[in-house]
Structures are given as structure tokens and as C-alpha cells.
Image (cartoon, rainbow, N blue to C red):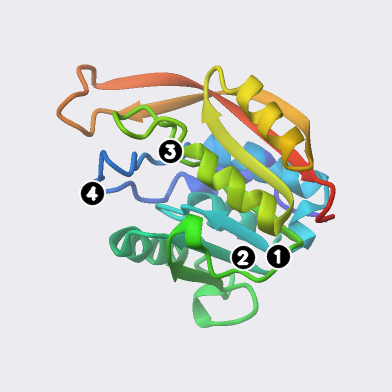
Amino acid sequence: MAGPSRRTLARRLESLADFADPSPALEQYLTPAELAAHLCHLAGLQNDLERPVIDLGTGTGMLAIAASLAGADRVAGIDVDPDALALARENERTALEGEGAADGNDRAIEWLRGDVSRHPFATTGATVLSNPPFGAQRGNRHADREFLETASEIAAVSYTIHNEGSQEFVESYAADAGGEVTHAFRAEFPISNQFEFHTEAEATLEAEVFRIEWSSRA
């Protein structure tokens, strides 16, 4: 599937707005434009954008919009937070202006309010993109597990972003659920000072990205 270059895609995504009042409980952080571009460029090279694409926990809509810009025709984003979905819709209008997506044609993204762990999707052959909570907040440990569980149910392939040190957990979970990690790479995840417990103007987390093929769903 031909699509924009990774650099061009990242530039387009830099226009997306961040959360004005993010929820620490939901660990709402803006997925970096460069990382979203890298992930969706790889998905395009693997022909994974030819399937329906579902962004679990879409937040600002970054990954769903990146997939659409990269050439995916059918994209949906789901989030439990209605304010996040309103922001995602606005970001779609901004990023896809001139491409017709905001006018309701086939490139439009479907935004759904719902809980990832109790999702409404009936498909078993999607490409899942997700930047789940890292589980950094108290009570959120292994919050990303629910996202992997849903990916294992609905995806032929998934791309998920996790906190540093997650490789053993992700590979073990994938193997137990009939999947296989085919690609894994590290990525920087800069976050701005958004919450009262942040002590620096900006910090950079080390993240890990995994592509999983769910063999029973391919």
C-alpha cells in the first residue's frame, strides 16, 4: 500500500491538539507524532492497513488519524472518555482537512464511546493499534493487559505501545493467547508537565512497541 513517507506523516500529525485537562487515572498522554508515524508507516509496509483498523483507547485520535493518513480506508477509534472523543473528532477535522474525510466519505473515521474491555466489535480480522495506559499510576498495574486481551479477540495483527521492560510480559501473553511477536523496537516517549505530581517541564520515557500476529485470527 502506497502512502506518505514517515517524515511527511509525522509533520501532518504534529498539528494535533493535546488534552486540555487530561485525566491522570486514565493516563491520558499525547502519543508522540513521530512514534505514531513510525508505527503506521511500518503497518503500511506490512500491508496491515488493508484490514479494518481499530484504535483501542484512542484518546486524542493520534493513531487512528495516523492510520487514515497512511492510507487505511476503514478506521475506528474507541474511548471511554467522551471529552477525548470530542477532541479526536476535532483533530480529525484539522489533520484530514482537504482529504474529504471530514465530509463523510469513505475515509471518515468512526469514533465510538465504549470500554475497551467490553468492546462492541464483532470482527476477528482487524488491525489493532493502541497506546494503552502504561500502568504507572497506583492501582493501574498491568492496565495494558486488558488491551492485549481485546486485541487477541478481534485482531489478526496488533501494534501496541508499552512501558520499558514489558517485553517478557507481552511475549508471554501473546504466546499463551495464540499470538507471536514479530517486531519489537524501543521508542522515546516525551511527555509534558501536565499533572501536579510532575516535577519537570518535560520528561522522556523509554517505551517499547510490539507487532503481534494472532495466528488464529489471520
Between 68 and 27, the one nearer to me in the picture = 27
Q: Which residue corresponds to the image point at 47% horizontal and 32% vertical from the top-left?
A: 142
x 53%, y 72%: residue: 110
Is there a contact, CB below 8 Å, between mark 1 and mark 2? yes
Compare marks 3 and 1 and give the one earlier in the sequence. 1
The earlier-in-sequence mark between 4 and 3 is 4
Tag 4 or tag 1, which sits nearer the N-term? 4
Q: CA distance from mark 2 to mark 3?
A: 21 Å
177 relative to 51, above or below = above
Q: Looking at the picture, how far across and down is residue 173, in whole percent?
A: 66, 34
Q: Amino acid at mark 4?
A: Ala
Q: Between disc 4 and disc 2, whose residue precedes?
A: 4
Q: Are marks 4 and 3 in contact (CB under 8 Å)?
A: no
The residue beneath circle 1 is 52
Q: Which residue is mark 3?
A: 133
Q: Earlier in the sequence, mark 1 or mark 2?
A: 1
Residue 75: give its label: 2
Front disc: 1 or 4: 1
Residue 52 coordinates in the image, percent (x, y): 70, 65
Give the amino acid type for the residue marked by disc 1 in the picture. Pro
Q: Around disc 4, counting alpha carbons within 10 Å, would you say few (fewer than 14), some (14 to 19), or many (20 or more)?
A: few
The image quarter containing residue 10 is: top right
Q: Is residue 7 visible?
A: no
State the image quarter where residue 198 is shown. Answer: top left
In primary-sequence order, the first of circles 2 and 3 is 2
